[in-house]
Amino acid sequence: MPLAPKDGTEAPKGRADASQGAAASLLNGLRVLEAFRTGRPTLGVTEVAQIVDLHKSTVSRILSGLAEAGYLERESETGRYRLGLGVIGLAGPLLAELDVRRLAQPALEALTLQTRETSSLAVWNGTGAVVAEQVSSPQFVKHTAYIGTRYDRYESSSVRLFLAFLPEGSVSQLLETDQISRSATSGLGTDVAGHLAEVRARGLAFNDGYTDPQEFGVAAPVRDYRGAVVGCITLAAPRGRISPDQHEDLGHAVGLAAEKVTDRLGGARA
């Protein structure tokens, strides 16, 4: 067997191929994990294969391996899979060290106490808004989301809030590649750049039934010391409980909560 080169020259082809194969397998495993969303918490082999565009036998092996490692759980009765507790173990250290999450908690509690609706903190992961913290409404009927829920619909208030502060080229790429999905019938119009400019100028993004006729939401940006948007505060409520004349007051309350978190971060307000 040839010895590994010690002078920085290229590794033997067989070893290089093996490294590339391992990297591809790792990426495929991550794609399989990302196939599980709030709207589809349980999936079968065929469904996952269609989502990630891999052969069923490959997906089956990946699912079995992830289940054995604790990142997925397999339902004995149906054979379908769901995310396992191992995923929390991975995300836990990140959430614990996320300063904006820790500093947002008092502002979220105060916002929910004031409005009696669900408030949350979301962060941007490059292709969507991810819920990092939440304080649920004390009311029986309410809108809530699990920590780690990812939103990738343009109509979502948190998604449009983040998009408003991204370069226009990045926004176009996310929409053109369907990493951010967009409905043609949401009522938001076709002028994406114009709409996002209004969101950016106002510092608020509203969801007045755009994602669902029964959902209302409003989001405002949290900034760091550079003035960069590092998160957003969102208020969510059943739309039937929110009258149009409440929109401005709720938007103002969310904006103030976001400013409080910005101040605690030592951030620069717009």
Image: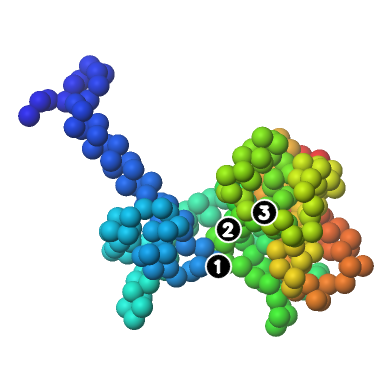
Q: Which residue is mark 1?
A: 39
Query: Gap between marks 2 and 1, in whole Å?
Result: 10 Å
Q: Residues within 10 Å of mark 3 (few under 14, many from 20)?
A: some
Looking at the image, the residue that sits furthest to the left is 1
Question: What is the x, y in percent for residue 132?
Answer: 59, 58
* Closer-to-camera residue (3/58): 58
Residue 3 placement: quadrant: top left
Q: Quadrant of residue 6?
A: top left
Residue drawn 78% across the image and 72% down it: 239
User: How far separated are the C-alphas under marks 2 and 3?
Assistant: 15 Å
Q: For mark 2, give the secondary structure.
A: strand
Tell me residue 21's x, y (percent): 28, 41
**What residue is shown at x 57% (from left), y 49% (from top)?**
179
Q: Nearer the viewer, residue 1 or 181?
A: 181
Residue drawn at x 34%, y 43% as measured from the top left: 24
Q: Amino acid at mark 2?
A: Arg
Q: Is residue 21 visible?
A: yes
